[in-house]
Image (cartoon, helix red, strand yellow):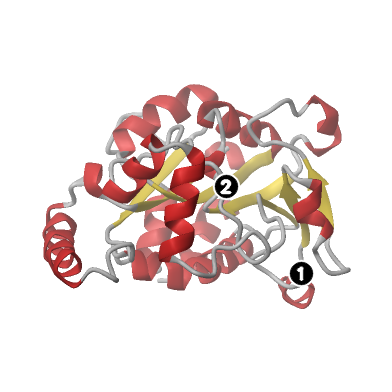
């Protein structure tokens, strides 16, 4: 079985025919779809396969309109890939400066996903798929961001967010440190994190958790009928420190086996309207 089989079977019924229990721990067609992709709970899998996951979702949902939240200067897909997918894709960002460096061929929309979206009423109930990479840790109000996404999704639409999570040590530190100091540390560890190539933005970590029970407590009242949270363990922040790196590698292996969600480093949060 593939993700196409899993989600297309659900899509074949009417949107209202999918009944999912709101109780924590209940499985949904989203869980089954990700299972079919052979998800591994290591951060390498999350990064390597994210584009494939989004592509599969586009096909499985027979998506016509999709939006990348916070796509800025580096959208997941090129104009040629968008054409190949057969979708109308909008690249969103809060910054007009970020959108201005995009090459020709992109449809754009400048708005704050966690802000006032009354000015984009024409986009409500529009998108079959909304997705983001490393964006939700930067929004001031995660609850409002997910609520706004609910308004933007078409009935039956899916939103997928790939984010770092608390309480992984590097992200706790990033959360607690002053913005300028946190940015300086990131730029020191990762030379490509420059203002011109890959800017560092202030991180807030509002509702960035890999604990499904905790996320459901916020997402269900918004109205989402399916929720799947996939945790991923490990990160590369200790690679330059051999002893710490090796201890972290051992501990990460233990956390993966035990599925200690509080110590996950990243998560896919997937929801269905």
Q: Residue 269: image x %, image y %?
A: 45, 46
Q: Which residue lies under the disc numbered 1?
A: 86
Q: Residue 79: image x %, image y %?
A: 79, 72
Q: Residue at x 35, y 62 (%)?
A: 35
Q: Quadrant of residue 147?
A: top right
Q: Of residues 234 and 59, which is closer to you in this image? A: 234
Q: Label 1, label 2: how many angstroms apart (C-alpha)?
A: 32 Å
Q: Is residue 31 above or below residue 125?
A: below
Q: Which residue lies under the disc numbered 2?
A: 201
Q: Is residue 235 above or below residue 117?
A: below
Q: Earlier in the sequence, mark 1 or mark 2?
A: 1
- Residue 180 marker: none
Binning the other alpha carbons within 10 Å of mark 1 as few (below 14), some (14 to 19) or many (20 upward) gives: some
Which quadrant of the rendered structure holds the N terminus? Answer: bottom left
**Which one is closest to the eye, mark 1 or mark 2?**
2
Q: Secondary structure at mark 2?
A: loop
Residue 271 visible: no
Q: Residue at x 51, y 49 (%)?
A: 161
Q: Residue at x 76, y 63 (%)?
A: 87
Residue 56 visible: yes
Q: Is 182 on the left or on the right of 263, as rendered?
A: right
Q: Quadrant of residue 155?
A: top right
Q: Are marks 1 and 2 in contact (CB under 8 Å)?
A: no
Q: Of residues 11 and 53, which is closer to you in this image? A: 53
């Amino acid at each position: 079985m593939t993700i196409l089989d899993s989600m297309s079977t659900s899509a074949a019924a009417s949107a209202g025919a999918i009944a999912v229990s709101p109780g924590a721990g209940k499985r949904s067609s989203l869980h089954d779809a990700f299972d079919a992709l052979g998800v591994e709970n290591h951060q390498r899998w999350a990064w390597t396969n994210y584009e494939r996951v989004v592509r599969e979702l586009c096909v499985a949902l027979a998506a016509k309109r999709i939006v990348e939240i916070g796509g800025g200067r580096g959208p997941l897909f090129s104009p040629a890939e968008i054409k190949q997918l057969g979708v109308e894709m909008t690249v969103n960002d809060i910054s007009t400066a970020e959108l201005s460096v995009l090459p020709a061929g992109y449809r754009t929309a400048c708005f704050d996903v966690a802000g006032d979206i009354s000015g984009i009423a024409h986009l409500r109930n529009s998108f079959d798929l909304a997705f983001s990479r490393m964006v939700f840790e930067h929004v001031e109000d995660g609850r409002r961001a997910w609520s706004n996404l609910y308004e933007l999704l078409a009935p039956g639409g899916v939103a997928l967010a790939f984010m770092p999570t608390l309480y992984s040590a590097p992200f706790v530190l990033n959360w607690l440190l002053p913005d300028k100091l946190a940015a300086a540390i990131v730029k020191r560890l990762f030379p490509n994190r420059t203002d011109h190539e890959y800017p560092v933005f202030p991180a807030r970590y509002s509702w960035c958790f890999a604990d499904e029970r905790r996320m459901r407590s916020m997402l269900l009242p918004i109205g989402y009928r399916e929720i799947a949270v996939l945790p991923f363990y490990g990160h590369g922040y200790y690679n330059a420190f051999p002893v710490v790196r090796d201890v972290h590698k051992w501990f990460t292996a233990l956390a993966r086996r035990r599925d200690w969600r509080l110590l996950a480093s990243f998560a896919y949060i997937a929801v269905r309207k």
